[in-house]
Amino acid sequence: MDRTPFYITTPIYYVNSVPHLGTAYTTIAADALARYRRMTGHDVFFLTGLDEHGQKVAQAADENGMTPQAWVDSIAPKFQEAWDMLDITYDDFIRTTEPRHERASQKLMQTLKDNGYIYQGHYEGWYCVPDETFYTEEQLVEGTCPGCGRDVQFIREDNWFFKLSAFQDRLLELYHDNPTFVQPDTRRNEVLSFVEGGLRDLSVSRTTFTWGIPLPFDPEHVMYVWFDALINYMTAVGYGSDDPADVARFERFWPADVHFVGKDIIRFHCVIWPAMLMAAGLPVPKQVFAHGFLLTKGEKMSKSKGNAITPASLVERFGVDAYRYYFLRDVQFGSDGSISIESMVQRYNGDLANDWGNLCSRLLNMTEKYCEGVVPARPHAADATSDDDEVRAIAEGLPAAYEAAMSRLDYVSALEGAWSLVKRVNRYIEDSAPWGLAKSEETRPRLDAVLYNALEAVRISALFISPVMPNTSADVWRRLGVSADVREVTDLAAAAGWGGLAPGSQVTKGDALFQRIVEE
Ligand code: ME8
């Protein structure tokens, strides 16, 4: 059976510093979607990587007394290590200094030139190196960058320009015809009003520094770093290569299904990028989804502001799965959200240790105690009580509810859906009191039915929790004696079918999934 392709990307991160909570946030969200789409049978291609050119990276190299290439080579493994630590299942890790990317960027630039959208001009204006963005005098706020508030530098150069202004109508048509091209709606409105205000042509080359990709038709100029960076999304699926396998891959995966970005970079992704593709006669991505900022004490968390906690320190304290869970559960994806150790401890103790971990331990314990650790027989549907039916109905409603949430990248709702089952089963156990049923042979059949239903609901909960917390879910399936690995499910509908848990399987209790954290 040919699986439907599904192409997901994260931004490619600047290698001016090491990965932090912000870059990890985007990457975890993209990973959860990649895992979920694999479960729904898609042929997923999940791309992440690094933006290695530009003045900001060259400056970081200089400050560290290294050549830019040596510097980027030294930082790249730190990103890969961080993503491995966070169990990110990327399919490709692109670095813009790779030959395949130089080839692709030059091909696109040449195509735009051939199509009449690149011309020579003179640039005079301001440039923010940390944001790698051009600004006009009027855009500055008290002489500083309107984006990040830092100092800007004046540049005066003969550059090559991209006729961005020619695409205003076509872009507006795109947003109109495809209302979910930019999501969420607040970002769509922002992009709409920006484009409605008129577009200026964009300077796309630089001559005053050399750390970039030379223009194919004027090698004294290097490409503006954002211009080369955006092209990475096509490079990785084969653009620019004549190899038939690459050509076929590009046909299969382009256009991308979703570009994950932070709200700071929507103009590049929702305005410049589709215009570049239109100019080249190529299809535009299906969606750009912009999430908000993680804030600490009300301020944007960033490395340069020095308020960054490292992902590794949190993983050490809470574990990988709880880390992934916290950021996707506590912050509505698409909005800004405050994060703190206190709220992380709260989520951990409440949702993970109490609701989910306790449910698993209690149930496995009782199965060991009352059923010799063996999953009891499937109860007859005819004997089901209204409580049994309710638990089953929630489980059977999960696939549709989860799909609806995930197709909007609403991780909070998706997780709440899974938790509605977890919480209902906790109450089911309280109400049915297996410890009472175990006291007499007469109530033995009811005890078996209750334990089967609860174990089955736990198996199904673990399935839906797995895109966010793959390791604990795999562990729960192992403890339930399920022979398959939950991380390898490719037919979610079948796997989620009620009654899938095999009677007679041997369960194992194991240690607590989440040890309660006592705050110091
Ligand atoms: O912009 N909260 O790279 P970058 C949430 N190279 N997300 C945050 C964040 C925060 N406090 N801080 C950073 C670039 N991010 C370009 C991208 S793509 C063709 C080129 C995340 O290293 C967020 O996703 O500055 C943001 O868009 C990204 O990191 C910026 O990473």
Image: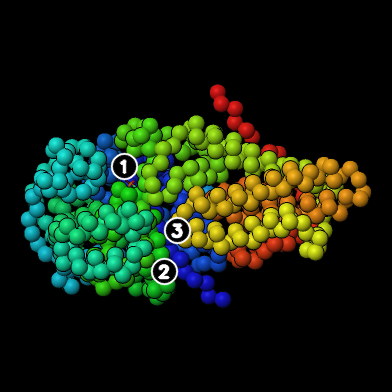
The x and y percentages for residue 137 are 10, 45
The x and y percentages for residue 481 are 74, 53
**Badge 1 or badge 3: first in the primary sequence:** 1
Residue located 40% across and 61% down the image: 258
Tell me the element at label 1: loop
Tell me the element at label 3: loop
User: Residue 193 — which label?
Assistant: none
How far apart are the two marked residues, 3 and 2, measured between alpha carbons? 21 Å
| Residue 457 image-quadrant placement | bottom right
Q: Is mark 1 within 8 Å of ligand 1?
A: yes
* Label 3 vs label 2, nearer the camera: 3
Label 1 crowd (10 A; few <14 / some 14-19 / many >=20): many
Residue tagged 2: 253
- Position of the N terminus, as image quadrant, is bottom right
How far apart are the two marked residues, 1 and 3, measured between alpha carbons? 32 Å
Tell me the element at label 2: helix
* Label 1 vs label 3, nearer the camera: 3
Q: Is residue 84 left or right of residue 243?
A: right
The residue lying toward the viewer, choosing from 442 and 466, is 442
The residue lying toward the viewer, choosing from 81 and 439, is 439
Residue tagged 1: 16
Kind of residue indicated by mark 3: Arg
Q: Is mark 2 within 8 Å of ligand 1?
A: no
Kind of residue indicated by mark 1: Asn
Residue located 61% across and 65% down the image: 493
Residue tagged 3: 408
The residue lying toward the viewer, choosing from 436 and 8, is 436
* Label 1 vs label 2, nearer the camera: 2
How far apart are the two marked residues, 1 and 2, measured between alpha carbons? 30 Å
